[in-house]
Image (cartoon, coloured by chain):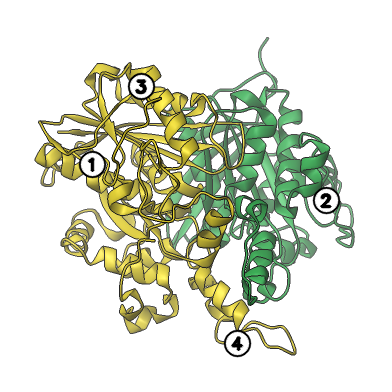
Amino acid sequence: MKIFVHGVGVLGPGIENWESCRRLFKEQLPYDDSVIPDPMPSILPANERRRSSDAVRLSLQVAQEAVQHSQLNPKTMATVFASSGGEVGILHKICQSLDSSMPIVSPTLFHQSVHNAAAGYWSIASGSQRPSTSLACYDSSFGGGLLEAATLLSANQEECVLFVTYDIPAPFPLYETRPLIAPFAVAFVLSKQTLPNSVAMLDITLLPAPTGHMPTTMADPSFEPLRSGNPAARSLPLLQTMATNLASCVYVDFLDNLQLRIDYQPCPPYPD
Amino acid sequence: MGKVERLEEVSLKSSLSHFTCRNNQLALLGLQQDGFEDQIAEARQHYGAHRIGILIGTSTAGILETEHAYQQKDPVTGRLPATFIPRGQYTQDAFSVAHFVRKYLELTGPAMVISTACSSSAKVFATASRYIEAGLCEAVVVGGVDSLCLTTLYGFSALQLTSPGPCRPCDADRDGLTIGEAAAFVFLEKSSTKRDRPTTALLGYGESCDAYHMSHPHPTGQGALLSMQASLKSSALSPSDIDYIHMHGTATVANDQTEDRAIATMFQGHTPCSSTKGWTGHTLGAAGAVAVVLGDLCLQYGLLPGCLNTNTVDPTFSSQILIENREQPVRSIMSNFFGFGGNNCTLILGKR
């Protein structure tokens, strides 16, 4: 399935946005993961932003960055939001309030608890009424989301898809069931056709194992704990390839026995 | 509340016992109905385990386990029970139900969970169609599983959306939904399959967002209408080709009113419609797959089900709401599903 990339947004430890990520990989700068930038998605009205969950702010920040980068109208974009844990912070708050002699769930927490909360807030903020899928695939959530986005485009159903994948560590004590290393999110604006601002072409193939290929790892091993420590960061080898912008091939493990092969091609200058 | 009795007694086979939670027990009970497992075993022989995908919708997976674990926290350290911590992945985690179904049915194709609240297991049909079209697999085990948990019981109650008695869809005095729990599975194959030809076809699907509010539907039903229009376009049908509209019809004041508006706009009161939530309760993330199973029965037996428990149709409604069951040949059914976050999906089923 061949698809084109028009915009990228990313946020994680030591990674403020796509430009800082691109420089980090392209110029092989030393990786300092000590600072996790605070997501501030201005697409959310200020009062909504204050009330919104960490997962919503994180995912909407990268979504907004990718859309701005693409210079395309978000109202034309279907969305795919892929996350293993989704709203783990809200789930923690709900479980806390249910552990009481007078259990309650606040109406706000309840509607914030759905796995598609981020997608819902994005749709309201961007005004997009195009289809929206929120999915979960444990450690393979990046791959699952990429497949959903690519099949939406290859079925000729959608012209343009905003694909966002994100995960945050849960608060204690829920954290111990799934100790993610740090928050991480990435978003891509994707389309079936090449456009004037296309930055790359991805050709995605689902491979049955064993393929004989190890999943692609990071050139700089200091990124490895992040890649393996957050499902959304399984996208890092692709981001590394995009930063160096050379034709190559990225392998991503999918579930326990499958693999995705992503053939990367930089886009030639668009013919006028 | 519609509860599956004695579900706690269902036991998962020992090699999969780490998946034990109410949601996966319900999934297992569903897989064991109507010879479904045997059909999948046969299909596995025919296609190969890696050519069959698994796409399941759920809203809350095994969250009940986590709710219980919080109630058993260590009073000193605040930690969850040591027996629960390694099982979070197989119970509470959103993907756990697809993981369990994949292992239980011994399938190795691509799998994921779609979780878009009450449209979850309708959207899996759309994704499954695209998977098959793109050649990712030959066939897909599609399903919906959602089980009772405190989060949804207290949450819907806090939103004042639950009825004190059995729900009454489209009734003038309707006062909210009845939460149910269910597992429903469907095996979706290419229309060109060389195996025994199935009797029911997925003719099309539509998806849309309201872009309006997290927990209230768009008042004019405009987002719902977009989804219904997309489903007609994808099936190349017109409103006059639809014999029956299977409503989302949760029996909340707002849902039924906006859905009536959307249906009336498209069908002008010419086509019978009803909700089956009076029979099943609202099974949330399982509602899509449950409605497809019911739709299959309606097509096979020529039945249009009435709204159970409904006495007087809301006089402000313009659609043709059925209260009594009606027997007549049915060629095609449009089914609606609307979830929190303004997430809409419409499926069209037909006879082959």
Residues flagged by tags 3 and 4 on a common chain: yes
Chain assignment, label 3:
B
Q: Position of residue B310 (x, y in %)?
A: 30, 42
Q: Work out how far the residue at label 3 is from the one at label 4, CA to CA, in angstroms.
A: 57 Å
Residues flagged by tags 2 and 3 on a common chain: no
Q: Which color has been applied to chain B in this rendered view? A: yellow
Residues flagged by tags 4 and 2 on a common chain: no
Looking at the rendered image, the disc whose residue lies closer to the viewer, 2 or 3, is 3
Q: Position of residue B228 (x, y in %)?
A: 39, 26
Q: Which residue is labeled 3 in the image?
A: B318
Residue contact at pointers 1 and 2, CB within 8 angstroms = no
Residue A15 badge: 2
Q: Residue furthest bottom?
A: B76
Q: Work out how far the residue at label 2 is from the one at label 3, CA to CA, in angstroms.
A: 55 Å
Q: Residues within 10 Å of mark 3 (few under 14, many from 20)?
A: some
Q: SS of the residue at dot 2?
A: loop
Relative vertical location of residue A74 with respect to residue B298 in this rendering, above or below = above
Give the residue displayed 36% in from the left and 38% down from the top.
B171
- Asked where in the image residue A97 lies, by quadrant, the reply is bottom right
Closer-to-camera residue (B93/B309): B309
Q: Quadrant of the C terminus of chain A?
A: top right
Q: Which residue is labeled 4 in the image?
A: B82
Q: SS of the residue at dot 1?
A: helix
Name the residue type under label 2.
Answer: Ile
